[in-house]
Amino acid sequence: MPTLDHENQLRRDGFRIVAGVDEAGRGPLAGPVTVAAVVLPADFTHALLNDSKQLTEKKREQLYAEITDDARIRWHCCVIGTEVIDRINILQATWEGMRRCALELEPRPDAVLIDGKPVKQYPLHQVALVKGDSLSFSIAAASVIAKVTRDRIMQRLAAEYPAYGFEIHKGYPTPGHLAALRKHGPCPAHRRSFAPVAQLELDLA
């Protein structure tokens, strides 16, 4: 269960404003990657907030509303589109989002807790936590915002490109998604640099 232990340790080390950073959408074949940064109040606690992957869609939506409506919480979410992902690769695109979303927070954090591994050339003091979304409330809150934001985008893309079932699989390479890709070919929302899409385009050429 997440706590504020890591945030409080950074505050004891002299970092006054501490943000949690997480992403959603590194693995899908379509749609953007979204990255969120969240600064929680020092007395924050929550009985249900956890890694967004451990929550139902309904619970994520409820938590998203609670977090974003709370005037004490500072947050920002960046959306990195498929054209950027294809140009610089998904890892670099995710890192770019992790840099941008923290820098665009107001006030700017003094340090960040990042889910996963360290981000190269990060502009702020960072502490990387593997499985951080289950350890840190700030990262868990960021994971919820990133996930809900991306899922809403995929719902809009599902209405725009109804043949692919984006509303069901959110762009991940499920059997149904791969079958639709084979039948219809990629749409503008697909990541051309990802192997299944790239190979399909070669096969159709």
Image (tube, rainbow, N blue to C red):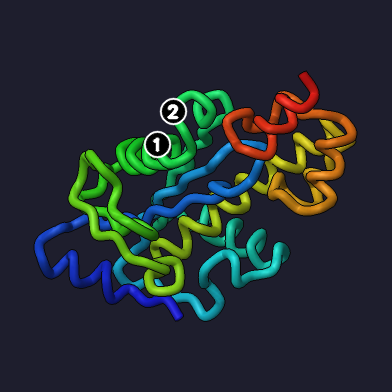
Residue 93 in percent (x, y) is at 44, 35
Q: Is residue 46 above or below residue 127?
A: below
Of the 4 image quadrants, the one containing the N terminus is bottom left
Q: Residue at x 17, y 57 (%)?
A: 16
Q: Return the residue nearer the eye: 88 or 19.
A: 88
Vertical placement of 157 versus 49: above or below? above
Residue closest to the eye, 203 or 16: 203
Residue 143 picture location, percent across and down? 50, 58
Tell me if label 2 and label 1 are in contact, CB under 8 Å.
Answer: yes
The residue drawn where x is 70% and y is 30% is 189
Which secondary structure, mark 2?
Answer: helix
**Residue 88, numbered circle:** 2
Residue at far left of view: 14
Q: Amino acid at mark 2?
A: Ile
Q: Say whether residue 8 is left or right of residue 24.
A: left
Give the crowd class for mark 1: few <14, some 14-19, many >=20 residues within 10 Å: some
Depth order, front residue of 155/15 = 155
**Residue 83 appears left or right of 92:** right
The residue sitting at the top extreme is 205
Determine whether, in the image, residue 154 is placed left or right of residue 161.
left
Rendering coords of residue 151 (x, y %): 68, 48
**Quadrant placement of the C terminus:** top right
Q: Which quadrant of the structure image shows residue 131?
A: bottom left
- Per the image, the residue denoted by label 1 is 92
In the picture provided, is 99 more to the left or to the right than 8? right
Q: Report the disc number at residue 187.
A: none
The total number of labels drawn is 2
Q: Residues within 10 Å of mark 2 (few under 14, many from 20)?
A: few
Quadrant hosting residue 198: top right
